[in-house]
Image: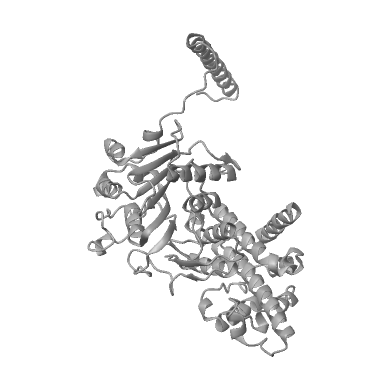
Amino acid sequence: MADKTNANIGFEKQLWDAACVLWGHIPAAEYRKVIIGLIFLRYISGAFDKRYQELVADGEGFEDDRDAYAMNGIFFVPQEARWDTIAAAAHTPEIGLVIDNAMRAIEADNKTLKNVLPKNFANPDLDKMVLGDVVDIFTNSIELSDISHSKDLLGRTYEYCIQQFAEKEGVGGGEFYTPASIVKTLVSILRPFDNCRVYDCCCGSGGMFVQSAEFVKAHSGKRQAILSVYGQEANADTWKMAKINMAIRGIDADFGPYHADTFTNDLHPTLKADFILANPPFNYRPWNQEKLLEDVRWKYGIPPANNANYAWIQHMIHHLAPNGKIGLVLANGALSTQTSGEGKIRKNIIEDDLVEGIIALPTQLFYSVTIPVTLWFITKGKQQPGKTLFIDARSMGHMVDRTHRDLSEEDIQKLADTFESFQNGTLEDVKGFCHVASIEDIAKQDYILTPGRYVGIAEQEDDGEPFEEKMARLTSELSEMFEKSHELEDQIRKNLGAIGYEI
């Protein structure tokens, strides 16, 4: 198993390293489409070929019947779009045009993909020799020769590349990617089940749905999770990325017929979801509040025009089924703001006994922003009525590089276990980490939800050193550091003076 995992990682990195040669020749968004498009093309061609061979072996003559593929959730791939056609043209000057034509042919035969697939491969700025090399990687990969394994591999490769794009693109990357550890934390705490309805009102590239499906498969023992997936995305390119991601994963998703703004054009107006997972844009504005003053979604108060945080929260509550659960990511300001009526809205939501838990996360988890964020869990029909769990997880995680932190599997499991113990009524408060508060407790804090107010400060271990001695020692060490600092400052002044600079 370890060898296969290492091989998977090798394939992902091999593809990424080869693709990075394209970087700098074309804009980042166009470059992203090239790689995503090739992953998609390789996947659907492999799935089609497997089904095609099965139909040929049956001898019934259905190998060209599109319904024979659709009934198995497989896209029909016409001859000019099959991978052997692409591979044969890999090192010809026409490779870009061949791939663009393949994408058009697939869209023509599969109406759900109309105007979704990228068709920028013939771009004259795209190095066709490098493009051919990338095609070769897909063609010659040993791992992809196993069709049953290739679906998972290409799905993971897609996610790996999306993560790399987010890191490369910085702030822009945050529009389509939520770090996997945050998504896994949300899913592990919410625990979606088979045959449930899952919704994300700002779905990005669809990572929430992928992790939900993986969780259901792992906990139901089924090879394929059955989920009713609903999403909405305002950005056209990101909406297309999500559609492609779902196709690669074999997830049947309803993202509406087009990209659209969630507030002004709710594409799922009657939906009541069992689980809602979302990472809405932080402190988003303007959001067309003036057009929506009478909207039915604002049950707890009209959100201010200059910040959509409480518009997102109320939109999700509006779409929640009885006993449904929400897990969302928000900037920390939403925990305590009192401006423009937000404090009143938060109070109303708390008094309606909807806030089940709040987790303060460490900084630097996102590629796009460094501000601290919080996970909110909002539930109808809480297992512990009148109570809210507060967790301070700011000390969790580890730095994976100079600027980015990640939560480990152990961190995620600890958070999920803490939540489960709370729901079962067996959790004991841990100073500095977790605390269960009543609505009355929260009211005494002016309905502010900052976890630090409730969990307190962790007790320090007694190391046996008397306080007076420790204070004297630390004061002495601090004085020595100050003295050393002054010496270094004098030396820097002398060195600068020697070359004609004065400070």
Q: Identify the residue at image location x=62%, y=84%.
A: 68
Q: Quadrant of residue 214?
A: bottom right
Height in image: 104 above or below 352? below
Q: Spot the residue most to the bottom.
A: 61
Q: Identify the residue at image location x=75%, y=73%.
A: 91
Q: Identify the residue at image location x=68%, y=83%.
A: 79
Q: Identify the residue at image location x=74%, y=56%.
A: 4
Q: Quadrant of the N terminus?
A: bottom right
Q: Quadrant of residue 279?
A: bottom left
Q: Quadrant of residue 211?
A: bottom right
Is 70 on the left or on the right of 323, as rendered?
right
Is 140 on the left or on the right of 477, as rendered?
right
Height in image: 443 above or below 302? above
Height in image: 182 above or below 146? above
- Front residue of 350/30: it is 350
* Residue 175 image position (x, y, % from top left): 47, 57
- Front residue of 168/257: it is 257
* Residue 135 image position (x, y, % from top left): 71, 69
* Residue 6 image position (x, y, % from top left): 73, 53
- Front residue of 32/229: it is 229
* Residue 362 image position (x, y, % from top left): 49, 40
- Residue 94 appears in the picture as rendered: no
- Residue 480 appears in the picture as rendered: yes
